[in-house]
Image: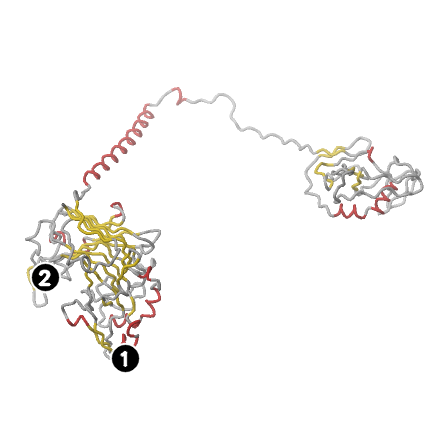
Amino acid sequence: MSHSKPSSSSGSSSSSLRPSSSRPSTSGTDAPPLPSTSFFIPTDHPSPSGSDGGHGEAPRDPFRTPEASTPSTPKPASVVSFSGFADHPVYRRHDSRISVQSASARRSHPDIQELHASGSGLRAQRNSFMPPRPMRQSVLHSPTHGASRLSVVPRAKKPMRSTMLTGAIEKPWLTEKDPRMTIAYWIVYFMALLGVAGGAVRCYFAWAQTLHLGNLCLVMEDNFDSFDLENTWTQEVTMSGFGNQEFEMTTSSSNNSFVRDGHLYIVPTLTSDVIGTDAVLGVTPHTFNLTGCTDTNATNCGAVSNASARAVIPPVMSARINTKQHYSIQYGRVEIRAKLPRGDWLWPALWMLPVDEAYGAWPRSGEIDIMEARGNGVDYTAQGIDYVRGSLNWGPFSWLNGVSKTFGWWTNRRKTFADGFHSYVLEWDARFMRIYVDSRLTYMLYLRFNEPFFQRGEFPSVVANGTGFVQLEDPWRNGTRNVAPFDRPFYLIMNVAVGGTNGWFPDGVGDKPWLDGSLNAMTDFAEAQSQWYASWPQNEEDRALVVDSVKMWKQC
């Protein structure tokens, strides 16, 4: 942009600036000024001295480190504007205040030209500054069209019109009380008081009716500082399948049951790790004799594999121990603190059987399951490792079992029972039986002995025994009323089973690789070893039933 020279000499520092239009004037008078750009000019910049056109001191670098003789803060700058109005306030680079045009601080036109010639650094500083978003403002013009003055005072908003009603507001309900309102208040207070009283009465009777065992005497306590196989535990060594046609053999090997760091471990392992997969499946026919077999039936002490006959050796080795020869109780308390194993088709159990089958073969003489679980994951829809179950087995025949009327479970919603130790407890006397995990509030089964078990089972009066129909008699008619068959001494068993065909693992759930009704169920399971073994942890701590302590009390 070009400017016309001022009419006064260049030596005058107080001459006013009047920019010329880019279009030549056609009259003797000057044309009104056009809007032009405002410049930042430091006020401490000296004007050219004298008329000789000499240059003064160079402008101070605002980014230079100040010396002791130089003020550390630059002086404010003035704004030169060729316009009587401005679109927005102008800001200086190092000052947040708005600079207002002052006539007394104006420079002459030659000064501005000199600054244009020598102030490229200053212009670079100006151009490098990005002003903030313009704020709304009022611009006041003087009558003489002189220097404009900027005002940052916001315009006052017109107050909103009130919608409040004028005049007196009638409130008849304050002067005339409705008796129905009083009655309504009293009804609310009465019902609240009745609810509190009813809750207190219910809590009292629930507490008063809770059955307790009374005085107890400690019978056995094992914290597993050692594995006492002489005076406490007995290992069961067999291939019988224990009536459930389970797929493991129980051994006396230290690989399957041992004590370490104050804990008892019952660990399932693969038979193929001992004799090879071909021997297990019968690809290479193999005869396996179970060392130290404790079964009275010799056929349960060995097995022969043959692929042509689809005969296999039990593909898993595990362990089962009991207290039958040393400790048992009739009424009392049992507490076992344990951590459960993880892995598909593992079946950990803490349970009790009668010392003498006084009422006949299983289940006539009863069975107490303190804890049973499945090692399958939490996505297993038939209750996986996040569930534990307690139950009683009883009935006149194995196929006429009343367990469906006396069982229950508890679930851990945040963690599984393989993530840590839990206490599994049985409380039992002639009036009731309670099975729970960790606390009486989290019970799995709470049964009052208030009716005979034969009546509780609702068994038919006539059944078929394979050769004809016979009259069904009460097998517990000579026992303790309402308690038999659970009126005899029972001993404790701890084991980890695998699979089985009794229905504990339902068909068609969780990619089960065998069918309970198949004659080759164990073979089908063994052939699917690569499938289910992938879910078993390699760490013994996670694959084992780990028992921290066992305690048994009897009523004194």
Q: Give coordinates of residue 67: x percent, y percent.
A: 76, 41
Locate residue 56 relative to residue 212 in the image: left or right: right
First in sequence, mark 2 or 1: give its number.
Answer: 1
Report the amino acid beneath label 1.
Answer: Thr
Closer-to-camera residue (363/216): 216
Q: Give coordinates of residue 244: x percent, y percent.
A: 20, 64
Residue at mark 2 to residue at mark 1: CA–CA distance? 47 Å
Find residue 284 and name its label: 1
Assign a secondary structure to mark 2.
Answer: strand
Find residue 463 and name its label: 2
In this rendering, does residue 393 appear at all? no
- Which residue lies at the image location 81% right of the left edge and 48% below the top edge? 120
To which quarter of the image does residue 283 belong? bottom left
Assign a secondary structure to mark 1.
Answer: loop
In front: label 2 or label 1 = 1
Report the amino acid beneath label 2.
Answer: Val
Q: Give coordinates of residue 200: x percent, y percent.
A: 25, 34
Image quarter in which the C terminus is found = top left
In this rendering, does residue 315 appear at all? yes
Find residue 442 and name its label: none
User: Is disc 1 surrounded by few (<14), some (14 to 19) or many (20+) residues within 10 Å?
Assistant: some
